[in-house]
Structure formats: structure tokens, C-alpha cells
Amino acid sequence: MIGPANSLLSSEAFYSPVLGKRENQVTDQQVNEGFRQAMRRLATTVALVTSGQGDSWAGMAATAVVSVCADPPTLLVAVNRTASLHPTLHAEKRFCVNLLSERHRDLVGIFSGQVRGRERFKRGNWVSGADGLPVLADALASLNCRTETTLDVGTHTLFIGRVEGVLNHDDIDPLVWVDGGFATAAR
Ligand SMILES: Cc1cc2nc3c(=O)[nH]c(=O)nc-3n(C[C@H](O)[C@H](O)[C@H](O)COP(=O)(O)O)c2cc1C
């Protein structure tokens, strides 16, 4: 049920009303849970964010990838500081965002914990791109970025990168992540 407009200020009233509480009195826990549930409704193309050179190649599956602006072309990725990719990203100051197509489903598990370290790159058509960055040759798009700014927010670091090279493929059949699972973009 959607309440009156001002109840949007209260995640409790909007999402999960608790009887007997004043309208705007919500606990952090309720907001956190409301946020998690809201984010299940945010559909995003899955990406593999990669960094490093040669033996130090590192990568992870990510959906927290945002187009910041087109002039200059700028991307933002949010990476948990506990992720194995984090130290490499920080040290290299370069990263590649590889947007996945439906045919890359199998890579997502591999790049989110099933396989560790450099072994992740044994599956998939990986080639060495600018400055030795790992590039998925048949990705929907691969964007080479140079990190310009970082910002720590809670558990994550935001890496904001200037896009210096782009490889686009003709097909646009993104692998979409929504409601905790895969979906396709029907048009
Ligand atoms: C679909 C999907 C999207 C993800 N998006 C992000 C993300 O944007 N940022 C992040 O830090 N972790 C994200 N993760 C989690 C990381 O992929 C995963 O925790 C990480 O690769 C595992 O850490 P490890 O490399 O240390 O094993 C996502 C996982 C999945 C399956």
C-alpha cells in the first residue's frame, strides 16, 4: 500500500508499517532492510570489473557501476574493501569495465567467489588490453578507465575513472541482474 506523499520520508510507513509507532519513527534496521528490498528492484547489467597486468590480473562481478557523465566520459564503480580486487585496483589506478551479455552467465559465479585469484581468467575470452589490463574480448562493451578519484563510503570504495578507450560489440543482449537473479532485457 502506498501512503500519503509525506510518508515517503518514512521507509517504515512506505514499505513495512509497524503498528503502534509514530509515522516517522523508523529504526536503522528497518531502513537497512527497506534499502535492501528496494535495491532488488534496481535492474542492472552485470559487469566484470578487472585490473592488474599479467600475473597480477584480478577481477570481480559487479553491478554497482554508474555512468557519471559523458563529458568527459566518466564511470564509477563501488568495490567492497574486503574484495580481492580492491588492493590491485588501488595500486594500479586503472581498471576495465566489461559489460556482460547473456552468453556470459557462467562467468558471474566464477568472478564472485567460486574461483579465486588469477584462476578466474581461465574461463572466457580474455586478452591483454591497454597497459596489460584484462579485457573480455567478446563483452558487450569494454571500457578502459584511469582512476581519477577515490572515495571511501561505508564498507566500499568508489573508484571514479576517466574512460580512455571503448570497445563496443554490435549485439545488445545484456545480462541483467534484478531481484537477486538473472534476467534478460526484453524489448
Ligand atoms: C551480480 C553480482 C553483483 C555484484 N556487485 C558487486 C559490486 O558492485 N561491488 C562489490 O564490491 N561486490 C559486488 N559483488 C560481490 C563480488 O563479486 C564478490 O563479493 C567478490 O568477487 C568476491 O570477493 P573475492 O574476489 O574476494 O572472492 C557482486 C556479486 C554479484 C554476484
Image: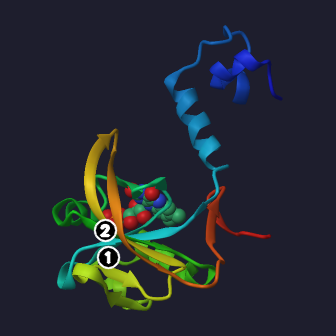
Which residue is more in the foreground, 97 or 39? 97
Q: CA distance from mark 1 to mark 2?
A: 19 Å
Which quadrant would residue 27 be assigned to in this image? top right
Numbered-mark total = 2
Image point (27%, 59%), residue name: 147
Q: Is residue 5 left or right of residue 21?
A: right
Image point (71%, 9%), residue name: 20
Report which residue position mark 2 lands on: 95
Q: Which mark is residue 116?
A: 1
- Badge 2 element: strand
Name the amino acid, label 1. Answer: Arg
Would you place residue 171 above or below residue 95 in this image?
A: below
In this rendering, which labeled residue sits more in front, label 1 or label 2? 2
Name the amino acid, label 2. Answer: Phe
Image point (64%, 83%), residue name: 171
Q: Which residue extends farthest front?
A: 71
Which residue is more in the foreground, 18 or 165? 165
Would you place residue 181 above or below residue 12 in this image?
A: below
- Badge 1 element: loop
Which quadrant would residue 169 be assigned to in this image? bottom right
